Image (cartoon, grey):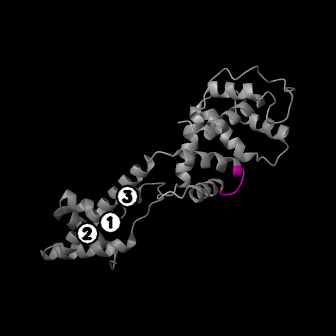
Amino acid sequence: VWDDLEKMNDDIELLCDKLSVMELSSLNDILGGPEAVEEGSNASVCVEALAEVKQCAVETAAGAERQSLVDIQQRNQARKEAAEKAREAKLAKASSPWSKEELSALAKGVKKYPPGGSNRWDAIATYINNLCRQPDPRTKEECIEKYNQVASSAGPASASAETTKTTTPADGSTGGDSNVKDGDDEIWTEEQDALLQEMLRKYPASMEKNERWKSIAKGVPGRNKKECVQRFKAIREAVRQGKN
């Protein structure tokens, strides 16, 4: 854009001297904002916008009306308004309550597409949308968020109730694990829940059940195999019942 670095520096100094803070902020925005020059940031300077910065410098040096800057400010304002509308639309959609039909479809989808499969949550979201035919389809992010909400609401009472209904662990064992406790007496932390979900993805249901749950338990500090099985079943049941 500039013939040499010295001319570019002269134009930048001119703009810094003549423009207001708001005008300089507008130029900064089209170049990519502060993130574009931060170390480690994924953002980059918008090279195409340098031509507009140079044109603004030319107009400023000539003492002419800075039409290029006016255009830039108008575009920036339109971009901000569009971003705000998009944010409001996203918030409105996020606050849209899940219907019982959607919660039921979520439970079925989680069961139909077990952890370990490729693009699992994309498949679950597609499954829910095909089944429910809502005007605003659910995204995979919404499905994950709702599943996590339901999972976090599944406390010890839910786990205890599930244990009462099923006396044999899901791994098919008969209580031979020496680390097994009599019950899940402690509340699961968010970190433990997150680790459990991570281990469920790491060790798919295609593994031998007993070996799978032993491996999962090793990845969840403070929990044994039986507790992990009970927690998984409590979360699954909570999803089925559509708890909030």
In the picture, measured across the screen, residue 127 lies left or right of residue 35, that is right
Q: Circle 2 — which element?
A: helix
- Tag 1 and tag 2, C-beta contact below 8 Å: yes
In terms of depth relative to the viewer, which is nearer, 156 or 77?
Answer: 156
Q: Circle 1 — which element?
A: helix
**Residue 224 in view of the camera:** no
Residue type, label 2: Ile
Q: Which residues are magenta?
A: 112-119
Q: Which mark is residue 30?
A: 1
User: Marks 3/1: CA distance?
Assistant: 19 Å
At 68% from the left and 38% from the top, the residue drawn is 196
In terms of depth relative to the viewer, which is nearer, 7 or 169?
Answer: 169
Residue 24 occupies which quadrant of the picture? bottom left
In the picture, measured across the screen, residue 214 lies left or right of residue 147, that is right
Residue type, label 3: Ala
Q: Which residue is mark 2?
A: 72
Say whether residue 144 is magenta: no
At 61% from the left and 57% from the top, the residue drawn is 122
Residue 161 occupies which quadrant of the picture? top right
The chief SS type of the magenta part is loop
Which sits earlier in the primary sequence, circle 3 or circle 1? 1
